């Protein structure tokens, strides 16, 4: 069975790394893009994205509901009989095309995000167990949310550019759409479409939506490069 990934990160009104100032929500501040200490930044970004993919895989293999974007990825994967990682990569590439009319500029981290998370998810989903007991599933799902938050803090904190999904939201914000509205609208849309396609909505979906913002807000200042 194909299984599924993603999300967006909320923030407060801050200058963002792709230029300009956009109104953002209250969960984390995205650091500005930088080119100094590039080797260290790329290393932190790659490690963070790997952790993100592993965290998402933990949530998926817990099988009690996946994050909103992953409901979509999972539903599409089921319909076209492809791996979830392949769908994650294809979705990221398609979203980057939508950056063109929004005049968003991708960074190294954007490209790494679009490719690496899907590749890691394909491997991790295949290797991780799929527990049957809810007493194992719930801790597995919650640990996945924590790992995703730490991975997010590392890759966002590396300052190498937003992921394809986050860039779409902030691009809309730069066109006058409040970021909270853009984020909520996009995630509700992909959640509904993914659910109709067969993606799994459950307690894990709710837990991710509730916990990921505060967790990223907690770890991002500690993991951002100065």
Image (cartoon, rainbow, N blue to C red):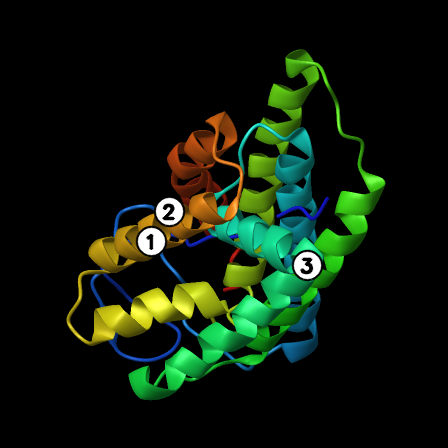
Residue 89 bears which disc, if any? none
Percent across and percent down for residue 58 are 68, 37
Q: Are marks 2 and 1 in contact (CB under 8 Å)?
A: yes
Q: Are marks 1 and 3 in contact (CB under 8 Å)?
A: no
Percent across and percent down for residue 96 are 47, 78
Image quadrant of residue 83? bottom right
Instruction: Label 3: state its secondary structure.
Output: helix
Residue at the disc numbered 2: 192
Image quadrant of residue 166? bottom left
User: Between disc 2 and disc 3, whose residue precedes?
Assistant: 3
Disc 2/disc 3 C-alpha distance (Å):
20 Å
Instruction: Label 2: state its secondary structure.
Output: helix
Residue 103 visible, this orientation:
yes
Residue at the disc numbered 3: 85
Percent across and percent down for residue 18 are 38, 78
Percent across and percent down for residue 22 are 23, 68
Disc 2/disc 1 C-alpha distance (Å):
5 Å
The quadrant of the rendering that contains the N terminus is top right
* Front position among marks 2 and 3: 2
Q: Residues within 10 Å of mark 1 (few under 14, many from 20)?
A: some
Q: Residues within 10 Å of mark 2 (few under 14, many from 20)?
A: some
Residue at image coords 65%, 22%: 137
Residue at the disc numbered 1: 189
Residue at image coords 38%, 33%: 210
Q: Residues within 10 Å of mark 3 (few under 14, many from 20)?
A: many
Residue at image coords 40%, 47%: 191
């Amino acid at each position: 069975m194909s299984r599924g990934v993603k999300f967006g990160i909320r923030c407060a009104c801050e200058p963002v790394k792709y230029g300009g100032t956009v109104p953002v929500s209250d969960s984390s501040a995205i650091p500005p893009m930088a080119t100094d200490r590039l080797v260290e930044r790329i290393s932190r970004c790659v490690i963070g994205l790997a952790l993100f993919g592993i965290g998402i895989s933990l949530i998926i293999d817990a099988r009690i509901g996946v994050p909103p974007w992953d409901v979509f990825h999972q539903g599409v994967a089921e319909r076209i009989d492809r791996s979830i990682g392949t769908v994650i990569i294809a979705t990221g590439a398609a979203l980057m095309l939508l950056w063109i009319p929004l005049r968003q500029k991708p960074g190294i981290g954007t490209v790494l995000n679009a490719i690496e998370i899907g590749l890691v998810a394909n491997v991790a989903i295949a290797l991780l167990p799929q527990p049957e007991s809810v007493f194992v599933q719930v801790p597995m799902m919650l640990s996945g949310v924590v790992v995703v938050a730490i991975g997010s803090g590392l890759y966002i904190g590396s300052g190498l550019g937003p992921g394809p999904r986050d860039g779409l939201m902030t691009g809309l914000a730069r066109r006058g759409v409040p970021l909270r509205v853009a984020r909520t609208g996009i995630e509700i849309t992909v959640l509904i479409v993914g659910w109709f396609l067969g993606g799994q909505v459950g307690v894990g979906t709710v837990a991710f939506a509730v916990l990921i913002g505060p967790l990223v807000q907690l770890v991002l200042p500690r993991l951002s490069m100065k």
